[in-house]
Image: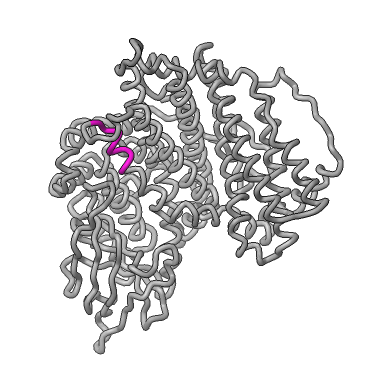
Amino acid sequence: MSERIYKGGEYLVSEVLCNEIFTPEEFTDEQKQIAETTEQFVTNEILPHLEEIDNQNFALVVEGMRKCGELGLLMLDAPEEYGGLELDKATSMLVGEKIATSGSFSVAFACHTGIGTLPLVYYGTAAQKEQYLDKIISGEWIAAYCLTEPGSGSDALGATASATLSADGTHYLLNGTKQFITNGSISQLYTVFAKIDKEHFTAFLVERDFEGLVVGAEEKKLGIKGSSTTQIILDNCKVPVENVLGEIGKGHKIAFNVLNVGRFKLGAGVTGAAKMALSEGIRYANERKQFGKTIGSFGAIQEKIADLTADIFAAESLVYRLAGLLDTKLATIEKGIDNYYEEYLKGIEEYAPECAISKVYCSEVLAHTVDEVLQIHGGYGFVSEYPAERFYRDERINRIFEGTNEINRLLIPGMILRKSMKGELPLQQEAMKAFESLMTPSFEEVDETVLFAREKALLKNLKTLFLILAGTGVQKFMDRIADEQEILLAAADIAIQIFALESAVLRAEKTYPGVSEQKKGRLAAAVKVCAFTATEIVGSAAKKGAFYIEEGDTLTMILSGVRRFAKYDASGLLQAKRLLAHAALEEEKYIFM
């Protein structure tokens, strides 16, 4: 693990070295053992019952959660002093990736271990942890998180649920309705957000048996049918004053900090789901015959498999690079200090832009994967006898969970620009240099003796494009840039692709020296495909953003820069794709596992 601590968003203005990132190839034996335990649990305890779970046999979900508790899978993030394991984020994300193959069950697991448990871990008093944490990390109780309301989703602070102190000062009376509550019907403990006196946004720990809490009917959903989703209705629900979680009026801190964790964990989970879906598509391509050949022998199918393999390689690289950033930062915080979790959450918040990137990029890789896997199956993919149909339905929620992808896209450049305004990132100075490069073209020779030299040169150019677009936008709109959502979305697409591609390139570079010639070829092929795809997306986003911001001579100059900087020599692209496809078809799985 690198000792250098990068700031959130700093990758856009710095050259990152491969020995400064964490990669999946560096998992320890202990981490691999935990991953194997998780895989065995899913294979033995969940997959045989998937159909029953999807038919809303929630007793099987509850039983599975208790078995997870027995295996220690619910206590990865809990403090040791309360019986937890308190493991690093890389391990936590690895378990999330492996559990993701369990369909709807993985949603119950992710909710419980993430937004269900972490508010108590991070903000609970010693008494609250003593009362509840052991029940949660053992699987005796299941936890849920109640933030969304019928009238407030992305605008979480627009919630109308209210809390009023009782006349004798012993209880708060909560009123309102919470919507789309995962684990709603199977939970015993809910983290509920309400406004005290209709003003002070506050979190409360609410037990299922508290008077006035009513669990609504199960929602009839498109996918994740085996995950309980209900309303939670609060009708003068009596909550003891000692069950206020965190500070009164500071509930937004809990809501948003826990969502950052949810985003990077979701990135890991959907990456695991994408690996599984791709493997299923590859197996089908090897079995299905048309025109006397397996469909996997056709170039049209091979290209799909190659593109998905490269996409997942980038997603996986991004997820564990982020895990390394988080673990390096969190390791600097001294355990035992009074404000440990306050500093801990500041450490996670530092990488809020990267957490949002992980959520958006990886969920969209899964979306692309399940769509193409269904297409590979043809008509059979559209019927429920084959898992492609379930993959397709279950995937869709991930672009809505943990803040919609649109909200997260707006957050990415917004948070990076705020860091710049606070002087935490030299974005303005670098943007000025980038804009000067438009007026003073220079053509640097690429040293082909350097590993992945073309891709590194490309990354430098793509970062220049981001700086040009962001700098021009801020110069024109100043603080009104926050209202120019179309421009922010274009900037986000560039920032996302840069982080994903750079993660793939650095991982390949770091791994390259110690692997066989065969694996070197695969790494080089994946990087080439990733680079080509990223260049196309960034070029389109940058051109669109230029038209949104400028006109006349300045527009012409920026468009000239787009043509110059969003350029990549992808010679050998077809051979690279065929190499990836042939390897995947031969091994019948995602080949970088």
Residue range highlighted in magenta: 386-393
Display colour scheme: one colour
Q: Residue at x 84, y 37 (%)?
A: 441
Residue found at the very far bottom of the displayed protein? 167
Residue 30 seen from this side? no
Is residue 555 shown left or right of residue 57? right
Asked if residue 94 is positioned above or below residue 152 in the image, the reply reads above
Q: Position of residue 389 (x, y in %)?
A: 28, 36
Q: Position of residue 444 (x, y in %)?
A: 80, 29
Q: Nearer the viewer, residue 94 or 553?
A: 553
Q: Residue at x 33, y 28 (%)?
A: 378
Asked if residue 586 is positioned above or below residue 506 in the image, the reply reads above
Q: Position of residue 206 (x, y in %)?
A: 25, 68
Is residue 165 shown left or right of residue 297? left
Q: Position of residue 75 (x, y in %)?
A: 29, 47
Q: Residue at x 18, y 75 (%)?
A: 212
